[in-house]
Amino acid sequence: MAVSALRAVDEIAFFALPACIFVTCRELRQPPQSAHRMTSATLRVVDSLAAIPPSRWDALVGARPLLSHAFLHALHETGCASPQTGWTPRYITAWKDDDLIGAMPLYRKAHSYGEYVFDWAWADAYRRHGRRYYPKLVAAIPFTPATGPRLIARDALTRKMLLQKALSLLAEERLSSLHILFPEEREVADCTRAGMIRRDSIQFHWANPGYRDFGDFLSTMNHAKRKKILQERRRLTDAGVVFSRVPGREATASDWAFFYRCYAKTYREHHSTPYLSLEFFLRLGAELADSVLLVMGRLGGEPVCAALDLYGGGTLWGRYWGTLSHISGLHFEACYYQAIEFCIERRIELFEGGAQGSHKLARGFLPVTTRSLHAVSDPDFARAIDAFVREERGDVARTVNELESASPFKEPAFARASPDSATAPQIIHD
């Protein structure tokens, strides 16, 4: 696909933007006056959530820890997602009197790190043609490939207003593109109707149809996969590794310090720099204690690995992990099996496996198509990118079909699947 992508972009001089995209984007550049009249709403772009009372923001987003005021504001205030790191907040908010009725977590980005939807080839094509790709606009939860609302609103008209405002910023600030990452399905429909380009990716999700316990889950798998999981867990038990799940309110400063050592080591092993700081995690533990779960593995009483999950309102996301001791099977137990047990105990319906990782298939995770949406200002590049993602969507669909045919379950793939990931409780793990 990479070769075809470069070829498509190299041929942009011969293409014109499809009329549906051009007309829609041109219309959306105009101020949404009719929407204003119908809702009496006021749109404001703010550069910090400090300008918005946490109670009003959280009342709008609901029980979604990753979109909460505490989570997003901590990313900004600790400098993890800030102008200094290439994430300049451009939060779009909609107000009716003093009531916050809509919001869009939008950032002006100076790079493509921490997005999990990869557009480096697009940026390189712009560079080779003497054009500027950065800065761009990105609607996302920084560093988090979690499906959820990006046009957060109580009604469809307010969602449309938020999208119109984002597209008008794209034109007013003369930026290359707008990217909406991991949106809900209803937002996909809204944005594609507005002419945005849809791109598909693959994640791996574990569904809980109401298992009684971990053994009940294993009973649904074929013999070979069930045997493999039992062997992986038994090997750790025989090695003397003991796991515990530590609620956020019980996590100590030393627990967080150890977790961060593990987290940072994972990045170093991949020759990278951690996106998040210990200060951010400490703040997370203090301000979202009821939404935090640390999974700790110990050998001889000493911690050897740790994983971090967040949960709330029937939803759980697992985000980061690391280990100081390379014992076979630690990753699967800390990131997957402990989280599966937690989901079963709490009756959480869906465990999202996050970005990448086909090895998750053998451990009960099935392939799911996730979305992103893209508005490209330059007509020629828009045509080339649209052609590329059309081809890519076909490749993704074929890959999903192939993976489904290799389901580890006795029943057909997705026979026990959960509700739509846009509304179901979730866990995310990279």
Image (cartoon, rainbow, N blue to C red):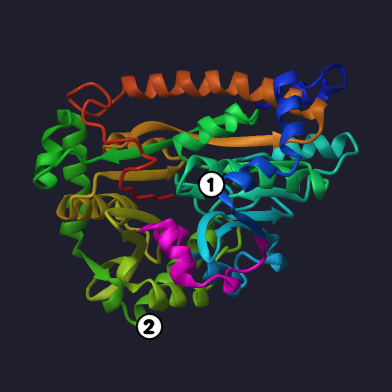
Q: Which residue is mark 2?
A: 253
Tally of numbered discs: 2
Front in this rendered view, residue 34 or 378: 34
- The amino acid type found where label 2 is placed reads Ala
Residue 380 on image: x %, y %: 82, 25
Q: What residue is rendered at 78% in x and 38% in y?
A: 124
Quadrant of image for the N terminus: top right
The residues colored magenta run 45-69
Figure quadrant of residue 413: top left
Q: Quadrant of residue 6?
A: top right
Name the residue rendered at 86%, 36% in the picture: 128
Horizontally, residue 74 falls left or right of residue 379, namely left
- Secondary structure of residue under mark 1: loop
Horizontally, is 103 left or right of 318 in the view?
right
The secondary structure type at the circle numbered 2 is: helix
**Is there any visible trace of residue 199 in the rendered image?**
yes
Label 1 packing within 10 angstroms: few (<14), some (14-19), many (20+):
many
In the rendered image, residue 383, in percent from the top left (x then y), is placed at: 75, 23
Vertical order, 400 against 104 (above or below): above
Residues at discs 2 and 1 in contact (Cβ within 8 Å): no
What residue type is disc 1 on?
Leu
Give the residue displayed 63% in from the left and 48% down from the top.
Answer: 36
The answer to whether residue 357 is magenta is: no
Answer with mark 2 or mark 1, whichever residue precedes in sequence. Answer: 1
Please name the residue that numbered disc 1 is placed on.
151
Principal secondary structure, stretch drawn in magenta: helix
